[in-house]
Every structure is written in structure tokens, then in C-alpha cells.
Amino acid sequence: MGSVIQGTLELKEIIPALIEEVARRAPAEYEQLVVNNALTHACGYDDEGYGDADTHLADELFEILDETAPEGQYFGAHPDDGADFGFWEAPC
């Protein structure tokens, strides 16, 4: 249980941390992202911000990590800090 990345809401910082955690916790899902070129097209940050592909990738990474959460936990924002993403005790 605990943080994967904290103190930011910037996709350019969140996505790399989530990719690293998916690679560690769910190597098969990570490999599928590589095969689908999802990571190649991600992190396209420019002055306009992130595109739809990056938002979609972040959502997919959150879903994969939530599915790998230990029993009784979930992956997402900390209940008291929306800029702290990690594994937390699921509410009763």
C-alpha cells in the first residue's frame, strides 16, 4: 500500500510513473501496450497540453493498476489528496 506518484496532476509526470508500475506489476499487460504501440504515441506533450491519446492511455494504466491491486485495496487518488496516486485500502 502506498504512493506510486504524488504531488502532481501533470500527465507528463504521471504517465511515466504509471507505465513503470504497470511494467513491474503486470508485465503481460505492459507488453500488450508495447505491441499496440500505445506507449509510442503517448506523452505527446506540447504547448497545447496532452491529447486524447494520452488521456486514454492514463485511463488504461489506472485500470490495469486497479486490477492488480491486492485484495482489499484499490489503485487511484488518495482519499485526502487528489494529487497522490497509489494503492489504498478500499472503503468498507
Image: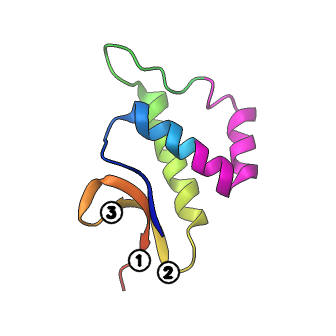
Whole-Å distance between the Cαs marked 1 and 2? 5 Å
Question: Which of the numbered marks, if any, corresponds to residue 90?
Answer: 1
Please give the name of the residue rendered at 30% of the width and 46% of the height, measured from the top-left corner.
7
Please, what secondary structure does the residue beneath circle 3 have? strand
Please, what secondary structure does the residue beneath circle 2 have? loop
Whole-Å distance between the Cαs marked 3 and 1? 11 Å
First of labels 3, 1 by sequence position: 3
First of labels 1, 2 by sequence position: 2
Determine whether 27 is above or below 41 in the image.
below
- The residue under label 2 is 72
Let me know if residue 72 is in the magenta part. Answer: no
From this viewpoint, is residue 64 visible?
A: yes
In percent of width and height, residue 29 lies at 70, 49
Please, what secondary structure does the residue beneath circle 1 have? loop
Relative horizontal placement of residue 36, taking residue 3 as reference (left or right) = right
In percent of width and height, residue 45 lies at 42, 20
Given the image, on which type of amino acid does mark 3 rest?
Answer: His
Whole-Å distance between the Cαs marked 3 and 2? 15 Å
Given the image, on which type of amino acid does mark 1 rest?
Answer: Ala
Residue furthest top in the image = 47
Please give the name of the residue rendered at 56% of the width and 79% of the height, measured from the top-left corner.
71
Do the numbered discs 3 and 1 sit on residues whose CB atoms are within 8 Å? no
Do the numbered discs 1 and 2 sit on residues whose CB atoms are within 8 Å? yes
What stretch of residues is rendered in magenta?
A: 20-40
First of labels 3, 2 by sequence position: 2
Taken as a whole, is the magenta stretch helix, strand or loop? helix
From this viewpoint, is residue 57 visible?
A: no
Q: Count the numbered circles shown.
A: 3
